[in-house]
Image (spheres, coloured by chain):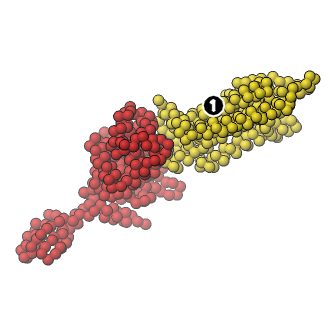
Amino acid sequence: MPDAFAASVLEKRYGGVTALAGVSLRVGEGELVGLLGPNGAGKSTLVKIGCGLVRPSGGRAEVFGRPAGSREARRALGYLAELFRFPGWLRADEVLRLHQGLAGSTGAEAERGELLELVGLADVGRRKVDQMSKGMQQRLGIAQAMIGGPRLLVLDEPTSALDPAGRRTVRTLLEELRGRGVSVLLNSHLLSEVELVCDRVVIITRGKVVAHGRPDELTQARGVTVETDQGEQRFDIGRDEVPELVARLVADGRRIYGVQVVRSTLEEVYLEAVEGEAP
Amino acid sequence: MTGIGVIAAATLRECTRRRVFGVIIVLTGLFLALYTLGTVTAFHHLGKPAPGDNVDITVLAGATLLGLAMFATLFLSTVVAVFLTFNVLRGDAEQGLLQPMVVRPPGRVVFLAGRFGAAALVSAVYAATVYAAAVVITGLVGGWWPDEVVLPGVELAAGAAVVTAISLAGSVYLSTIANGIAVLMLFGAGLVGGLLGQIGDSIHSDTLSSIGTVTSWALPFEALYQSGLHALTSETSGLTGVIVHLGPLGGAQPTGPLLAPWVLGYILVVVSLAGAAFARRDL
């Protein structure tokens, strides 16, 4: 079975500027993959190529085995752009109806109601877009992306305008989508968000993939902190050596109150990966 | 409903919601009121034609006034066409309005065709309606009716569709303001080219005549306008015929049977080229 999204040695140049320099990545069916990277790393370009908005200079991008941008590929995906606007004169419900028409969705009012409910906009379906806050518009954008039940959801900074409660709603939503077997490519600056929900993380900087893997693979164990009667001490050992260390400390007459294996955070991994590629 | 239908319906709804139609109706009402006043005044001052006059002043006044109304109608429908299309591609893309829609299955070419269809329909119907109103006003006030009533209206409507296609194509490449200015300048250039051609025919200048001919082919709304003007008095002969065929603001010229297929082909090619360019553009 083909991947939901597959990029192979993808390149994109804007004149003399290289946005992507041979990026390869895949999003499996039902997988939630987070895309991380600093501003200008090429994340949005990658996402736009996946949606057919930008043409690659080299390499190949496919959605469920179909060339990205083809009608079949577009039929399979839902997309929320980083910088998007809906016509201010449309009501929230009408935005969804317009996209139902374009997506060929037969979900009618039931689908619109369900999606508005899902993103917490059930009460404002009749409200015009230009009377909605930025956060509400972003929620509407997420609902719009889910019209027609796409098999691949491409979300470019879906929580940038949301408050903490809104972010939690989106996290819950993403987990629910994964449960339904929907694949998600999530481009986000929010490391904690990516760490919490993503199956895999891909870190891009200067148009290249510099790290990728499951969050728990990327965040390695980095020693042990032991709380004793003489205070907290850090030991640069692995998890397997903890019993031996504790036995030695007890034999030395120390009283042990707690032991914690220290792992690097995704933020540390991210900064190491990005700074390692700095010019 | 097809993708084109969905986009066209959304465009028409936008016109309604943003009070485009309201503004057009009010301002066109003012134009027609002014035209009525001018027509009443002109015919009142001219009085009745006297026996033995070489020039039929009723025909001269009616054709001149309606010719002026046709020029105004073409200009107003050009403004309508430009404002409905000048920002629909690059302008909307820069604002992020376009991207959510063109990633949907119908895609970019269908989006463009839908926008063109709706805008061309609105501007063409507008041109035909204002022309029809001007004909009725001229006929009721002055007792003069054009030799051909329907053809000039159809040609004005087709001219508006041509301008719509040009403006839509411009919006692929040019920013909103640049495109608006460019299309209005092309409109002016087309009319000036036609006028030069008319002068060239009168003074037997091949250079000026060629300018007029090339302009008419390159910007066929000008040829349509000239053809429409000519059709108003196509059966009028004698000195009156000579004078009225000079026409107001660009002159009247018969164009021949090639004009209709040329205009259809022109619109098709311009919209197709716009579609091809839009399909390749990074958004």
Name the one closer to the observer, A100 or B80. B80
Can residue A29 be seen here? The reply is no
Circle count: 1
**Left or right: residue A37 compared with residue B158:** left
User: Which chain did the image draw in yellow?
Assistant: B
Q: Secondary structure at mark 1?
A: helix
Q: Residue at x 66, y 30 (%)?
A: B129
- Tell me the amino acid under the disc marked 1: Val
- What residue is drawn where x is 61% and y is 40%? B23
Examine the rendered structure and indicate whether residue A179 appears above or below residue B49. Answer: below
Q: Is residue B278 visible?
A: yes
Residue B265 falls in which quadrant of the image?
top right
Q: Is residue B163 left or right of residue B47?
A: left
The residue that disc 1 covers is B125
The residue located at (77%, 27%) in the rendering is B141
Residue A278 at x, y percent in the picture: 40, 65
Chain that bears disc 1:
B
**Which residue is drawn at the image coordinates 83% and 24% (left, top)?**
B236
Single out the residue that lies furthest toward the right. B52
Q: Colour of chain A?
A: red
Q: Residues within 10 Å of mark 1 (few under 14, many from 20)?
A: many
